[in-house]
Image (cartoon, rainbow, N blue to C red):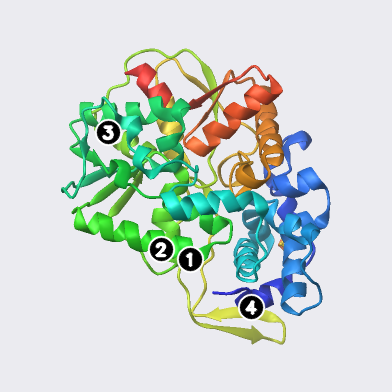
Amino acid sequence: MALKDFEKDMMRDSRCSYCKVIPHVMMTDTRFIDVCPSVARFNFHGFSAGGRMVAGLSLLRNRIEYTDGFLDMIFQCQMDGACDVSCKIDRDLEPLQVMQELRIKCIEDGQLIAGHMPVLEGLRKEDNMLQRKKADRGKWADGLDIKELAGGKAEVLFHAGCRYSFDEELWPTVKTGINILKEAGVDAAIMGKDEACCGGRAYEMGYEAELIKYADHNIQAWKTAGVKTIVTPCSCCYQTFKVLYDKIGKKPEIEIYHFTEYLDKLIKEGTLKLKKKVPIKVTYHDPCHLGRLSEPWIHWSGKEIKVAGQMIVHDPAKKYRRGAEGVYDIPRDILKAIPGLNLVEMYRIREYAWCCGSGGGVKEAYPEFALWTAAERLKEAKDVGADALVSACGWCKRNFTDAVKETGKKIEVYDIVDLVQEAL
Ligand code: SF4
Protein backbone atom coordinates (compact mmCIF):
# COMPACT_ATOMS: atom_id res chain seq x y z
CA MET A 1 0.00 0.00 0.00
CA ALA A 2 1.02 3.63 -0.34
CA LEU A 3 -0.34 7.00 0.75
CA LYS A 4 -1.95 7.35 -2.69
CA ASP A 5 -4.12 4.28 -2.00
CA PHE A 6 -5.84 6.22 0.81
CA GLU A 7 -6.61 9.33 -1.19
CA LYS A 8 -10.36 8.72 -0.97
CA ASP A 9 -10.15 8.29 2.83
CA MET A 10 -8.33 11.60 3.09
CA MET A 11 -10.90 13.27 0.80
CA ARG A 12 -13.76 11.92 2.92
CA ASP A 13 -12.33 13.22 6.18
CA SER A 14 -15.15 15.35 7.61
CA ARG A 15 -13.10 17.37 10.17
CA CYS A 16 -15.58 16.03 12.74
CA SER A 17 -12.88 15.61 15.44
CA TYR A 18 -14.32 12.36 16.79
CA CYS A 19 -10.74 11.05 16.67
CA LYS A 20 -9.74 13.33 19.55
CA VAL A 21 -11.99 11.81 22.23
CA ILE A 22 -13.47 8.51 23.35
CA PRO A 23 -16.98 7.84 21.98
CA HIS A 24 -19.72 9.83 23.70
CA VAL A 25 -21.39 6.74 25.16
CA MET A 26 -18.16 5.86 26.96
CA MET A 27 -17.72 9.27 28.58
CA THR A 28 -18.29 9.05 32.32
CA ASP A 29 -15.99 11.80 33.60
CA THR A 30 -15.21 14.95 31.63
CA ARG A 31 -11.63 15.01 32.94
CA PHE A 32 -10.85 11.76 31.16
CA ILE A 33 -12.37 11.92 27.68
CA ASP A 34 -9.31 12.75 25.55
CA VAL A 35 -8.02 9.75 23.65
CA CYS A 36 -5.30 11.26 21.42
CA PRO A 37 -2.23 12.27 23.46
CA SER A 38 -0.88 14.29 20.54
CA VAL A 39 -3.76 16.74 20.16
CA ALA A 40 -4.35 16.82 23.93
CA ARG A 41 -0.73 17.87 24.44
CA PHE A 42 -0.22 20.26 21.50
CA ASN A 43 -3.80 21.54 21.21
CA PHE A 44 -3.77 22.09 17.45
CA HIS A 45 -5.90 20.22 14.87
CA GLY A 46 -2.81 19.30 12.83
CA PHE A 47 -1.71 17.10 15.73
CA SER A 48 -4.80 14.88 15.40
CA ALA A 49 -5.64 12.08 12.99
CA GLY A 50 -7.99 14.45 11.17
CA GLY A 51 -5.23 17.05 10.80
CA ARG A 52 -2.84 14.43 9.47
CA MET A 53 -5.46 13.32 6.91
CA VAL A 54 -5.49 16.91 5.61
CA ALA A 55 -1.68 17.08 5.73
CA GLY A 56 -1.34 13.79 3.82
CA LEU A 57 -3.67 14.95 1.07
CA SER A 58 -1.87 18.29 0.78
CA LEU A 59 1.48 16.53 0.52
CA LEU A 60 0.17 14.12 -2.09
CA ARG A 61 -1.12 17.00 -4.18
CA ASN A 62 2.08 19.03 -3.83
CA ARG A 63 0.29 21.84 -2.02
CA ILE A 64 2.79 21.91 0.86
CA GLU A 65 6.47 21.29 1.43
CA TYR A 66 8.34 19.55 4.21
CA THR A 67 9.28 21.75 7.17
CA ASP A 68 10.48 20.92 10.68
CA GLY A 69 7.04 21.89 11.98
CA PHE A 70 5.34 19.53 9.52
CA LEU A 71 7.57 16.63 10.57
CA ASP A 72 6.95 17.33 14.27
CA MET A 73 3.24 17.21 13.55
CA ILE A 74 3.54 13.82 11.83
CA PHE A 75 5.97 12.18 14.26
CA GLN A 76 4.82 13.56 17.64
CA CYS A 77 2.26 10.78 17.78
CA GLN A 78 2.43 7.35 19.44
CA MET A 79 0.59 5.62 16.56
CA ASP A 80 -1.54 4.04 19.28
CA GLY A 81 -4.62 3.67 17.09
CA ALA A 82 -7.15 5.18 19.52
CA CYS A 83 -8.06 7.83 16.92
CA ASP A 84 -8.78 5.05 14.43
CA VAL A 85 -11.24 3.36 16.80
CA SER A 86 -13.06 6.62 17.54
CA CYS A 87 -13.18 7.63 13.87
CA LYS A 88 -14.74 4.29 12.93
CA ILE A 89 -17.59 4.83 15.39
CA ASP A 90 -19.08 7.13 12.80
CA ARG A 91 -17.25 6.59 9.53
CA ASP A 92 -15.42 3.80 7.75
CA LEU A 93 -12.09 5.53 7.22
CA GLU A 94 -8.51 4.39 7.90
CA PRO A 95 -6.72 7.28 9.66
CA LEU A 96 -4.11 5.02 11.28
CA GLN A 97 -3.12 3.54 7.92
CA VAL A 98 -2.92 7.05 6.46
CA MET A 99 -0.58 8.10 9.29
CA GLN A 100 1.55 4.98 8.77
CA GLU A 101 1.86 5.56 5.02
CA LEU A 102 2.56 9.24 5.60
CA ARG A 103 5.53 8.31 7.82
CA ILE A 104 6.80 5.79 5.26
CA LYS A 105 6.62 8.50 2.59
CA CYS A 106 8.54 10.95 4.79
CA ILE A 107 11.34 8.42 5.25
CA GLU A 108 11.36 7.54 1.53
CA ASP A 109 11.65 11.26 0.77
CA GLY A 110 14.68 11.52 3.07
CA GLN A 111 12.83 13.41 5.83
CA LEU A 112 14.45 11.77 8.85
CA ILE A 113 13.85 12.49 12.53
CA ALA A 114 17.09 13.25 14.38
CA GLY A 115 16.02 11.43 17.54
CA HIS A 116 15.35 8.24 15.59
CA MET A 117 18.70 8.09 13.82
CA PRO A 118 20.89 6.59 16.59
CA VAL A 119 18.17 4.00 17.23
CA LEU A 120 18.03 3.01 13.56
CA GLU A 121 21.83 2.86 13.32
CA GLY A 122 21.89 0.63 16.41
CA LEU A 123 19.18 -1.57 14.95
CA ARG A 124 21.04 -2.03 11.67
CA LYS A 125 24.28 -2.85 13.45
CA GLU A 126 23.16 -4.75 16.55
CA ASP A 127 19.62 -5.98 15.73
CA ASN A 128 17.99 -4.22 18.69
CA MET A 129 16.18 -0.96 19.49
CA LEU A 130 18.16 -0.07 22.61
CA GLN A 131 21.56 0.65 21.05
CA ARG A 132 23.16 -2.21 22.94
CA LYS A 133 25.57 -4.96 21.88
CA LYS A 134 23.92 -7.94 20.21
CA ALA A 135 26.34 -10.23 22.08
CA ASP A 136 24.73 -9.14 25.40
CA ARG A 137 21.18 -9.93 24.35
CA GLY A 138 20.86 -13.20 26.28
CA LYS A 139 22.49 -11.95 29.51
CA TRP A 140 19.15 -11.54 31.24
CA ALA A 141 18.89 -15.34 31.36
CA ASP A 142 22.32 -15.91 32.95
CA GLY A 143 21.98 -18.34 35.83
CA LEU A 144 18.60 -19.66 34.66
CA ASP A 145 18.40 -23.30 33.76
CA ILE A 146 16.90 -22.69 30.30
CA LYS A 147 17.76 -24.22 26.97
CA GLU A 148 19.44 -21.72 24.67
CA LEU A 149 19.04 -22.50 20.99
CA ALA A 150 22.31 -22.47 19.15
CA GLY A 151 21.38 -24.25 16.00
CA GLY A 152 19.26 -26.62 18.12
CA LYS A 153 15.52 -27.37 18.04
CA ALA A 154 12.60 -26.35 20.29
CA GLU A 155 8.83 -26.41 19.91
CA VAL A 156 8.14 -23.54 22.34
CA LEU A 157 10.26 -20.41 22.05
CA PHE A 158 10.23 -17.64 24.64
CA HIS A 159 10.97 -14.39 22.78
CA ALA A 160 11.95 -11.70 25.29
CA GLY A 161 12.12 -8.79 22.84
CA CYS A 162 14.57 -5.85 22.85
CA ARG A 163 13.15 -3.98 25.87
CA TYR A 164 13.09 -6.91 28.30
CA SER A 165 16.44 -8.22 27.00
CA PHE A 166 18.40 -5.05 27.68
CA ASP A 167 16.49 -3.15 30.40
CA GLU A 168 18.02 -4.61 33.58
CA GLU A 169 15.19 -3.31 35.80
CA LEU A 170 12.79 -5.50 33.79
CA TRP A 171 14.86 -8.67 34.00
CA PRO A 172 12.98 -10.02 37.06
CA THR A 173 9.81 -10.15 34.93
CA VAL A 174 11.33 -12.29 32.18
CA LYS A 175 13.24 -14.46 34.65
CA THR A 176 9.92 -15.08 36.41
CA GLY A 177 8.36 -15.88 33.06
CA ILE A 178 10.91 -18.61 32.44
CA ASN A 179 10.52 -20.03 35.95
CA ILE A 180 6.75 -20.17 35.53
CA LEU A 181 7.11 -22.07 32.25
CA LYS A 182 9.54 -24.51 33.86
CA GLU A 183 7.30 -25.02 36.89
CA ALA A 184 4.43 -25.76 34.52
CA GLY A 185 6.56 -28.38 32.75
CA VAL A 186 6.75 -26.50 29.44
CA ASP A 187 9.84 -27.46 27.46
CA ALA A 188 10.69 -23.93 26.33
CA ALA A 189 13.90 -22.42 24.94
CA ILE A 190 15.27 -18.96 24.21
CA MET A 191 17.40 -17.74 21.33
CA GLY A 192 19.73 -15.77 23.60
CA LYS A 193 22.19 -13.63 21.67
CA ASP A 194 20.73 -14.91 18.39
CA GLU A 195 17.31 -13.40 19.12
CA ALA A 196 16.61 -10.42 16.84
CA CYS A 197 14.27 -7.44 16.96
CA CYS A 198 10.75 -7.97 15.61
CA GLY A 199 10.98 -4.85 13.44
CA GLY A 200 7.63 -3.47 14.60
CA ARG A 201 8.79 -0.32 16.35
CA ALA A 202 11.00 0.66 13.41
CA TYR A 203 7.97 0.20 11.15
CA GLU A 204 5.94 2.56 13.33
CA MET A 205 8.72 5.11 12.84
CA GLY A 206 8.23 4.74 9.07
CA TYR A 207 10.93 2.17 8.26
CA GLU A 208 9.06 -0.48 6.30
CA ALA A 209 12.20 -2.19 4.97
CA GLU A 210 13.22 -3.06 8.56
CA LEU A 211 9.89 -4.78 9.19
CA ILE A 212 10.27 -6.87 6.03
CA LYS A 213 13.89 -7.71 6.86
CA TYR A 214 13.11 -8.91 10.40
CA ALA A 215 9.97 -10.77 9.32
CA ASP A 216 12.04 -12.76 6.83
CA HIS A 217 14.85 -13.32 9.32
CA ASN A 218 12.69 -14.37 12.26
CA ILE A 219 10.34 -16.61 10.31
CA GLN A 220 13.32 -18.44 8.76
CA ALA A 221 15.02 -18.79 12.18
CA TRP A 222 11.84 -20.24 13.71
CA LYS A 223 11.44 -22.65 10.79
CA THR A 224 15.04 -23.85 11.08
CA ALA A 225 14.61 -24.43 14.82
CA GLY A 226 11.33 -26.31 14.38
CA VAL A 227 9.44 -23.76 16.51
CA LYS A 228 5.69 -24.37 16.69
CA THR A 229 4.78 -21.84 19.40
CA ILE A 230 6.12 -18.39 20.27
CA VAL A 231 5.47 -16.93 23.72
CA THR A 232 6.43 -13.30 24.30
CA PRO A 233 5.87 -10.96 27.25
CA CYS A 234 6.33 -7.93 24.97
CA SER A 235 3.08 -6.55 23.55
CA CYS A 236 4.89 -4.82 20.69
CA CYS A 237 6.58 -8.06 19.54
CA TYR A 238 3.27 -9.89 19.92
CA GLN A 239 1.43 -7.42 17.70
CA THR A 240 4.26 -7.42 15.16
CA PHE A 241 4.39 -11.22 14.86
CA LYS A 242 0.62 -11.66 14.85
CA VAL A 243 -0.62 -8.65 12.91
CA LEU A 244 2.12 -6.75 11.07
CA TYR A 245 3.79 -9.82 9.54
CA ASP A 246 0.35 -10.83 8.25
CA LYS A 247 -0.28 -7.29 6.99
CA ILE A 248 2.84 -7.45 4.79
CA GLY A 249 1.95 -10.93 3.50
CA LYS A 250 4.37 -12.88 5.73
CA LYS A 251 2.04 -14.54 8.24
CA PRO A 252 4.05 -17.12 10.26
CA GLU A 253 2.58 -20.63 10.30
CA ILE A 254 2.99 -21.02 14.06
CA GLU A 255 1.00 -20.25 17.20
CA ILE A 256 1.74 -16.85 18.71
CA TYR A 257 0.91 -16.17 22.33
CA HIS A 258 1.33 -13.13 24.46
CA PHE A 259 2.61 -14.35 27.83
CA THR A 260 -0.70 -13.39 29.49
CA GLU A 261 -2.56 -15.71 27.09
CA TYR A 262 -0.19 -18.55 27.96
CA LEU A 263 -0.48 -17.82 31.70
CA ASP A 264 -4.25 -17.77 31.46
CA LYS A 265 -4.18 -21.16 29.73
CA LEU A 266 -1.96 -22.61 32.48
CA ILE A 267 -4.15 -21.13 35.25
CA LYS A 268 -7.45 -22.26 33.71
CA GLU A 269 -6.23 -25.83 33.09
CA GLY A 270 -5.00 -25.99 36.71
CA THR A 271 -1.29 -26.35 35.90
CA LEU A 272 -0.49 -23.07 37.60
CA LYS A 273 -2.06 -22.43 40.99
CA LEU A 274 -2.31 -18.93 42.44
CA LYS A 275 -2.43 -19.57 46.19
CA LYS A 276 -0.93 -16.68 48.11
CA LYS A 277 -2.90 -13.54 48.89
CA VAL A 278 -1.74 -10.32 47.25
CA PRO A 279 -3.79 -7.68 49.10
CA ILE A 280 -3.43 -4.70 46.78
CA LYS A 281 -5.81 -2.42 44.91
CA VAL A 282 -4.73 -2.26 41.27
CA THR A 283 -5.95 -0.90 37.98
CA TYR A 284 -5.09 -2.45 34.64
CA HIS A 285 -3.64 -0.45 31.76
CA ASP A 286 -4.42 -1.99 28.35
CA PRO A 287 -1.21 -1.81 26.28
CA CYS A 288 -2.19 -0.51 22.81
CA HIS A 289 -0.28 -3.35 21.11
CA LEU A 290 -2.00 -6.04 23.19
CA GLY A 291 -5.39 -4.34 22.96
CA ARG A 292 -6.80 -2.59 19.92
CA LEU A 293 -3.69 -2.95 17.73
CA SER A 294 -3.52 -6.74 18.20
CA GLU A 295 -6.82 -7.29 16.43
CA PRO A 296 -6.10 -9.73 13.58
CA TRP A 297 -5.32 -8.18 10.21
CA ILE A 298 -8.14 -8.32 7.66
CA HIS A 299 -7.11 -8.60 4.02
CA TRP A 300 -9.58 -7.24 1.53
CA SER A 301 -9.59 -6.72 -2.17
CA GLY A 302 -12.55 -5.76 -4.28
CA LYS A 303 -14.21 -2.72 -5.66
CA GLU A 304 -15.96 0.33 -4.33
CA ILE A 305 -19.38 1.14 -5.76
CA LYS A 306 -21.28 4.41 -5.44
CA VAL A 307 -25.02 3.91 -4.95
CA ALA A 308 -27.57 6.69 -5.64
CA GLY A 309 -24.71 9.07 -6.37
CA GLN A 310 -23.42 9.21 -2.83
CA MET A 311 -23.62 6.01 -0.79
CA ILE A 312 -20.44 3.89 -0.86
CA VAL A 313 -20.66 0.09 -0.77
CA HIS A 314 -17.95 -2.50 -1.27
CA ASP A 315 -18.06 -5.67 -3.34
CA PRO A 316 -17.33 -8.01 -1.62
CA ALA A 317 -18.41 -6.44 1.68
CA LYS A 318 -15.49 -4.93 3.56
CA LYS A 319 -14.91 -5.73 7.23
CA TYR A 320 -13.11 -3.07 9.25
CA ARG A 321 -10.78 -3.46 12.22
CA ARG A 322 -12.42 -1.52 15.03
CA GLY A 323 -10.19 -2.56 17.92
CA ALA A 324 -12.77 -4.62 19.82
CA GLU A 325 -11.06 -7.95 19.03
CA GLY A 326 -7.88 -7.25 21.02
CA VAL A 327 -6.75 -9.09 24.17
CA TYR A 328 -8.76 -7.45 26.95
CA ASP A 329 -10.43 -10.09 29.16
CA ILE A 330 -7.46 -12.41 29.66
CA PRO A 331 -5.23 -10.04 31.67
CA ARG A 332 -8.25 -9.08 33.77
CA ASP A 333 -9.13 -12.76 34.34
CA ILE A 334 -5.56 -13.38 35.59
CA LEU A 335 -5.73 -10.43 37.99
CA LYS A 336 -9.13 -11.57 39.27
CA ALA A 337 -7.68 -15.05 39.90
CA ILE A 338 -5.06 -13.63 42.30
CA PRO A 339 -6.38 -14.10 45.86
CA GLY A 340 -6.90 -10.87 47.80
CA LEU A 341 -6.30 -8.59 44.81
CA ASN A 342 -8.84 -5.82 44.18
CA LEU A 343 -9.13 -4.73 40.52
CA VAL A 344 -10.67 -1.33 39.80
CA GLU A 345 -11.16 0.04 36.29
CA MET A 346 -10.12 3.40 34.91
CA TYR A 347 -12.40 5.55 32.73
CA ARG A 348 -10.65 4.86 29.41
CA ILE A 349 -10.23 1.11 28.98
CA ARG A 350 -10.08 -1.66 26.38
CA GLU A 351 -10.15 -0.25 22.81
CA TYR A 352 -10.66 3.24 24.22
CA ALA A 353 -7.60 3.12 26.48
CA TRP A 354 -5.22 6.06 26.77
CA CYS A 355 -1.70 5.16 25.59
CA CYS A 356 1.30 4.77 27.95
CA GLY A 357 3.17 7.24 25.75
CA SER A 358 6.12 5.18 24.57
CA GLY A 359 5.02 3.97 21.11
CA GLY A 360 5.54 5.26 17.59
CA GLY A 361 9.13 6.37 18.21
CA VAL A 362 7.99 9.00 20.74
CA LYS A 363 9.98 7.59 23.66
CA GLU A 364 13.08 7.73 21.45
CA ALA A 365 12.64 11.14 19.78
CA TYR A 366 10.32 13.12 22.08
CA PRO A 367 10.96 11.81 25.63
CA GLU A 368 9.26 14.76 27.37
CA PHE A 369 6.03 14.06 25.43
CA ALA A 370 6.30 10.36 26.28
CA LEU A 371 6.53 11.17 30.00
CA TRP A 372 3.69 13.70 29.86
CA THR A 373 1.44 11.04 28.29
CA ALA A 374 2.34 8.48 30.97
CA ALA A 375 1.78 11.06 33.73
CA GLU A 376 -1.76 11.65 32.43
CA ARG A 377 -2.45 7.93 32.84
CA LEU A 378 -1.00 7.93 36.36
CA LYS A 379 -3.47 10.72 37.28
CA GLU A 380 -6.34 8.55 36.02
CA ALA A 381 -5.09 5.52 37.96
CA LYS A 382 -4.83 7.57 41.15
CA ASP A 383 -8.28 9.04 40.54
CA VAL A 384 -9.91 5.60 40.70
CA GLY A 385 -8.12 4.92 43.97
CA ALA A 386 -5.56 2.39 42.73
CA ASP A 387 -2.37 1.80 44.71
CA ALA A 388 -0.74 0.24 41.66
CA LEU A 389 -0.90 0.41 37.89
CA VAL A 390 -0.47 -2.96 36.18
CA SER A 391 0.39 -3.49 32.56
CA ALA A 392 1.53 -6.33 30.33
CA CYS A 393 4.31 -4.81 28.27
CA GLY A 394 7.89 -3.83 29.05
CA TRP A 395 7.63 -0.57 27.11
CA CYS A 396 4.60 0.49 29.19
CA LYS A 397 6.32 -0.46 32.44
CA ARG A 398 9.48 1.43 31.51
CA ASN A 399 7.60 4.61 30.59
CA PHE A 400 5.28 4.53 33.61
CA THR A 401 8.21 3.85 35.92
CA ASP A 402 10.09 6.81 34.43
CA ALA A 403 6.99 9.00 34.84
CA VAL A 404 6.59 7.99 38.49
CA LYS A 405 10.22 9.03 39.11
CA GLU A 406 9.68 12.31 37.22
CA THR A 407 6.38 13.29 38.85
CA GLY A 408 6.88 11.81 42.30
CA LYS A 409 3.37 10.30 42.11
CA LYS A 410 2.76 7.77 44.86
CA ILE A 411 1.81 4.73 42.86
CA GLU A 412 3.45 1.36 42.20
CA VAL A 413 3.96 0.07 38.66
CA TYR A 414 3.83 -3.67 37.95
CA ASP A 415 3.97 -6.05 35.07
CA ILE A 416 1.16 -8.58 35.50
CA VAL A 417 3.80 -11.35 35.62
CA ASP A 418 5.28 -9.77 38.77
CA LEU A 419 1.93 -10.08 40.58
CA VAL A 420 1.43 -13.67 39.40
CA GLN A 421 4.86 -14.47 40.86
CA GLU A 422 3.79 -13.01 44.22
CA ALA A 423 0.70 -15.21 44.21
CA LEU A 424 2.50 -18.52 43.51
S1 SF4 B 1 -9.94 11.34 11.13
FE1 SF4 B 1 -12.05 10.59 11.26
S2 SF4 B 1 -12.73 11.26 13.30
FE2 SF4 B 1 -10.90 12.48 12.80
S3 SF4 B 1 -11.67 14.38 11.86
FE3 SF4 B 1 -11.28 12.92 10.20
S4 SF4 B 1 -13.25 11.89 9.85
FE4 SF4 B 1 -13.38 12.89 11.85
Q: Is residue 302 above or below residue 332?
A: below
Q: What numbered label is drawn on residue 213?
A: 2
Q: Choose between 214 and 89: the one closer to the eye.
A: 214
Tell me the number on the disc at residue 4. 4
How far from the left and from the top, in percent, is residue 164? 43, 36
Per the image, the residue denoted by label 3 is 266
Whether label 2 touches label 1, CB < 8 Å? yes
Examine the rendered structure and indicate whether residue 225 appears above or below residue 340: below
On the image, the x and y values in percent for residue 380 come to 68, 29
* Front one among 280 and 26: 280
Res 357 → quadrant: top right
Does residue 146 appear to the left or right of 110 in the view shown? Answer: left
Q: Residue at x 51, y 46 (%)?
A: 291
Q: Quadrant of the N terminus?
A: bottom right
Residue type of the residue flagged with mark 3: Leu
Q: CA distance from mark 4 to mark 1?
A: 19 Å
User: Which amino acid, mark 1?
Assistant: Ala
Question: Closer to the observer: label 1 or label 3?
Answer: 1
